[in-house]
Image (cartoon, helix red, strand yellow):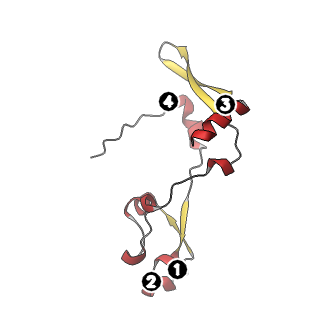
Amino acid sequence: MNYRKTYQIKSQFKDLAGNVLLPSFYVDAHQIMSGIFANSDEIQKHLEKEDLLSGYGDASRKFKLAAQNADINFQEVESTLFRIDLEVTTADDYRPAFQQLNQKQAQRISAVY
């Protein structure tokens, strides 16, 4: 059973959501596989959702996303930060409102992370 809450995309945002690019994960197939499978012409293996959740490769060299380092050094990342709030447009509809953070606000957030 899937206990995660899911929400349908409102029809007005479907085109916009279709343009969102999600990250793709690849592994060097020769480092993960051994034996007869390592001799394939496949150099990089695109990992699908199932590969990332359950692992991919030989038992001794299995790649599993949950076991990978998730530490991000935000001090080394240059970015423009925005605060995103929802504004009421009608009684039951909302739209995102974006406000760029100034340098002081961005430094406070970067100090936390």
10 Å crowding of disc 2: few (<14), some (14-19), many (20+)? some
10 Å crowding of disc 4: few (<14), some (14-19), many (20+)? few
Distance between mark 2 and mark 1 Cα atoms: 7 Å
Q: Which residue is mark 3?
A: 105
- From the viewer's perspective, tell me whether residue 53 is left or right of residue 106: left
Amino acid type at image mark 2: Ser
Q: Residue at x 73, y 33 (%)?
A: 103
Q: Position of residue 86 (x, y in %)?
A: 55, 23
Q: Position of residue 99 (x, y in %)?
A: 67, 26
Labels 3 and 4 touching (C-beta < 8 A)? no
Picture quadrant where residue 15 is located? top right
Q: Which residue is mark 2?
A: 34
Q: Earlier in the sequence, mark 3 or mark 4?
A: 4
Q: Which mark is residue 10?
A: 4
Q: Secondary structure at mark 4?
A: loop
Q: Which residue is mark 1?
A: 30
Q: Secondary structure at mark 1?
A: helix
